Amino acid sequence: MSEMGLQIISFIGALLILIAYAGHQMKWMSDGVWYNILNFLGSSLLGYVAFFPFKIGFVVLEIVWAAISLWALFRRTSMKNT
């Protein structure tokens, strides 16, 4: 992928995480489904970009962030189904 493509992907990823953070801080959204979806998508995109070139610190940070967001999303969904 081109450098410009990676820059665009990283910008979108960061923007998604910042929207979730700002929305939560401004009380526009709770830490519910949309908060976790935005965090998961944003961190997944940033995790992808961290592989080109490989940056271990950012790869670990973003993959763990995505995994925690996904876990919270499934936990919330499974709690509603019980």
Image (cartoon, rainbow, N blue to C red):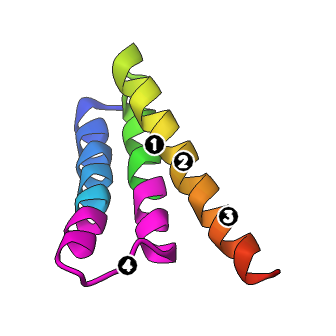
Q: Which residue is mark 1?
A: 65
* Separation of marks 4 and 1 at Cα, in angstroms: 18 Å
Task: Give the secondary structure at mark 1.
Answer: helix
Q: Which residue is mark 4?
A: 30
Q: Which residue is mark 2?
A: 68
Sequence-earlier tag: 4 or 3: 4
What is the magenta segment's predominant secondary structure? helix
Q: Residue drawn at (68%, 63%), measured in percent from left and top?
A: 74
Residue 75 numbered tag: 3
Q: Give the residues drawn in magenta, as a range.
A: 19-40
Residue kind at label 4, given as amino acid type: Ser
Please say whether residue 24 is one of the residues in the magenta stretch: yes
Q: Residue drawn at (63%, 54%), measured in percent from left and top?
A: 71
Percent from the top left, x then y, of residue 18? 23, 59
Q: Quadrant of residue 25?
A: bottom left
* Residue 54 in view here: no
Q: Using a 10 Å C-alpha cutoff, classify the residue at mark 3 as few (fewer than 14 neighbours), some (14 to 19) or many (20 or more).
A: few
Marks 1 and 3 in Cβ contact (< 8 Å)? no
Residue kind at label 1, given as amino acid type: Trp
Please say whether residue 80 is one of the residues in the magenta stretch: no
Percent from the top left, x then y, of residue 29? 33, 81
Sequence-earlier tag: 4 or 1: 4
Percent from the top left, x then y, of residue 56? 41, 15
Q: Quadrant of residue 16?
A: bottom left
